[in-house]
Amino acid sequence: MRNRPVVDASPEAAAAIDAVLDRFGTGALRVAASAGVRFVHLRATERYRDRSRALRRLASGVDDWPVPPAGLFVVEERAVYLRSTSPMTVAHEFAHALDCALGGGAYLSGVDPRVRRAFRSARAFITPYAASGLDEYFAESLRAWVEANDPRSPWPRATRARLRELDPAMAEILESIFANDLVT
Ligand SMILES: [Zn+2]
């Protein structure tokens, strides 16, 4: 039984990814590993469709976007694909993977009434992207919980203290998830 997700990357990229994963703690890494979550870092010339069967199947792929996304989580493959190993990207995509692992294969954020209620009644969001949907709300809040940031991001720093201040309901949900569900 693995204790942390498999990381398919060069030694240098794997070290960067692992350093961000460590921020989530051993409980979270174990939950993700048992759900089969894995990481794939794309090499310089690789495209998403080169590594992902699911993304290959899609007619209009993300590879054709003017700027392809820095990372992606593919639910049906339980795989995080990364072009960037920046802390922000790794933490955000792993947060989706953890959301999926906690929900038993579907996003917990989509079905948990506590998360839905917090999202509906939120007066402020940790980042603009968090307001775009339940899954991004969960991912960005969780990124704030582990405080993974990029110096170059135009958004305010996502930190636990800011999350508690802006969105205490969501901070409490994450606190209980980490206290009850992830520590075994
Ligand atoms: Zn996302």
Image (cartoon, grey):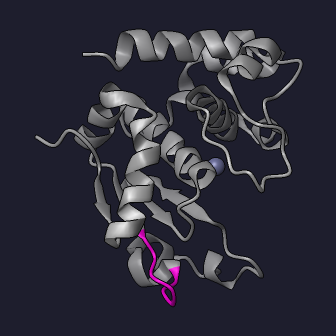
Residue 171 screen position, x and y as percent: 64, 15
Residue reaching furthest right? 123
Residue 92 screen position, x and y as percent: 59, 46
| Residue for point 72% across, 34% down | 158
Residue 172 screen position, x and y as percent: 61, 9
Which of 157 and 57 lies nearest the eye of the viewer? 157
| Residue for point 38% across, 9% down | 180
Q: Would you say residue 67 sits in the magenta stretch?
A: no
Question: Left or right of 98: which side holds 4?
Answer: left
Residue reaching furthest left? 1
Q: Can residue 28 be seen in this snapshot?
A: yes
Q: Quadrant of residue 66?
A: bottom right
Q: Quadrant of residue 162?
A: top right
Please state the extent of the stretch shown in magenta in the rendering.
Answer: 41-47
Quadrant position of the C terminus in the picture: top left
Prevailing secondary structure of the magenta residues? loop
138 up-or-down from 54: above or below: above
Which of 118 and 26 lies nearest the eye of the viewer? 26
Quadrant position of the N terminus in the picture: top left
52 up-or-down from 93: above or below: below
Which of 123 and 12 lies nearest the eye of the viewer? 12
Q: Can residue 76 be seen in this snapshot?
A: no
Q: Quadrant of residue 124?
A: top right
Q: Would you say residue 42 sits in the magenta stretch?
A: yes
